Amino acid sequence: MTIREVQNEINRLKKENDICILAHSYQAQEIIEIADFTGDSYALSKLARTAPNKTVIMCGVRFMAETVKMLSPDKKVILSSPIAGCPMAEQMDVELINQLKEMYPDYTVVAYINTTTELKTVCDVCVTSSSAVKIVKQLDSENILFIPDCNLGAYVQKQVPEKNFKLVHGGCPVHASVTRRDAEKAKAEHPNAELLVHPECVPSVVELADYVGSTSGIMEYASKSSNKEFIIGTENSIAEHLQYSCPDKDFYVLSKALMCKNMKATTLIDVLNCCKGRGGEEIELDPLTIEKAKKCIDKMISLGG
Ligand code: 13P
Ligand code: SF4
């Protein structure tokens, strides 16, 4: 079968079986094309609540599928590839967070959404890269314990200097692999290009950027900008999607290392199989865990707008 034939079959099965396909922007172009909705983590979390379909296939990583399940427990939620985890989400456990809460009892625990559902049960509020600054500013507490990404935490801290932050050493191994030297080299090679980076990059890279934002933020900025050249400092699929949607502009990858193998684990055939009711992994969460973990997702959506 050609790619187009597989896509046609997926589209037919989606209708027949009342399926909604959500795809994170890091997915490959051929998957983006068959998705009902594409976006950053925040947009996908919100869409998860309103999709009317009985079944949702999440083409992304595990914590994203678990977020959909928490927000729509009556739906059948399938993670398109069972091996697609987010290494950052697994970096901390409940025991560590409970110890930190004992050490810093008057701190509000702000968890990046890239965390396990279990971890969310002991946190106060979730944030995504596009909503973190807005949400942290609105919290009553002046004291913020930000987990698990110290790079995103450092970025938020800079934007909200009036609050006290405790950061814990954790983060995205893909984004954190980019060095300041990589950024300087890319800027020297493309002197007319603007550097757009994700806040999961280390602070010494972020401070060289012309724009810092989520995957959707970067895409929107580049599409609207009158500039013609951009260096993209996030997963390399974003540069590819932008080149496709803005053929009159030039996009360069900041580093070849910006490739998330987990986000790229899903193939079009995986999605076809999920639509046929085989493959993928159905997300199962016990109701008590959902009840406890969902509070910080609900708070994120109510403060994030
Ligand atoms: P976004 O919040 O930009 O979707 O980022 C998710 C992610 O996993 C980035 O690495
Ligand atoms: Fe996780 Fe980083 Fe991959 Fe995003 S890019 S899913 S944070 S490992």
Image (cartoon, rainbow, N blue to C red):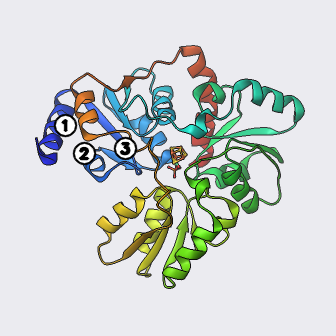
Q: Tag 2: residue type?
A: Ile
Say which element carries label 2.
Answer: loop
Q: Earlier in the sequence, mark 3 or mark 1?
A: 1
Q: Nearer the viewer, residue 20 or 152?
A: 152
Residue occupied by mark 2: 34
Q: Earlier in the sequence, mark 2 or mark 3?
A: 3
Q: Residue at x 33, y 68 (%)?
A: 243
The numbered dot on residue 71 is: none
Residue extending farthest bottom: 192
The numbered dot on residue 23 is: 3
Residue occupied by mark 1: 10
Q: How many residues crowd mark 1 within 10 Å: few (<14), some (14–19), many (20+)?
A: many
Mark pair 2, 3: CA separation: 9 Å
Locate the N terminus by quadrant. top left
Q: Nearer the viewer, residue 125 or 88?
A: 88
Q: Are marks 2 and 1 in contact (CB under 8 Å)?
A: yes
Q: Establish if 232 lies above or below 248.
A: above
Q: Tag 3: residue type?
A: Ala
Q: Nearer the viewer, residue 185 or 269?
A: 185
Query: In the picture, residue 229 is in which quadrant?
Result: bottom left
Looking at the picture, how far across and down is residue 85, in whole percent?
Answer: 49, 34
Say which element carries label 3.
Answer: strand
Residue 113 makes an appearance in the image: no
| Mark 1 vs ligand 1: CB below 8 Å | no
Q: Tag 1: residue type?
A: Ile
Mark pair 3, 1: CA separation: 14 Å
Q: Residue at x 46, y 61 (%)?
A: 256
Q: Establish if 132 lies above or below 202.
A: above
Looking at the picture, how far across and down is residue 118, in whole percent?
Answer: 62, 24
* Total numbered badges shown on the rendered structure: 3
Mark pair 2, 1: CA separation: 7 Å
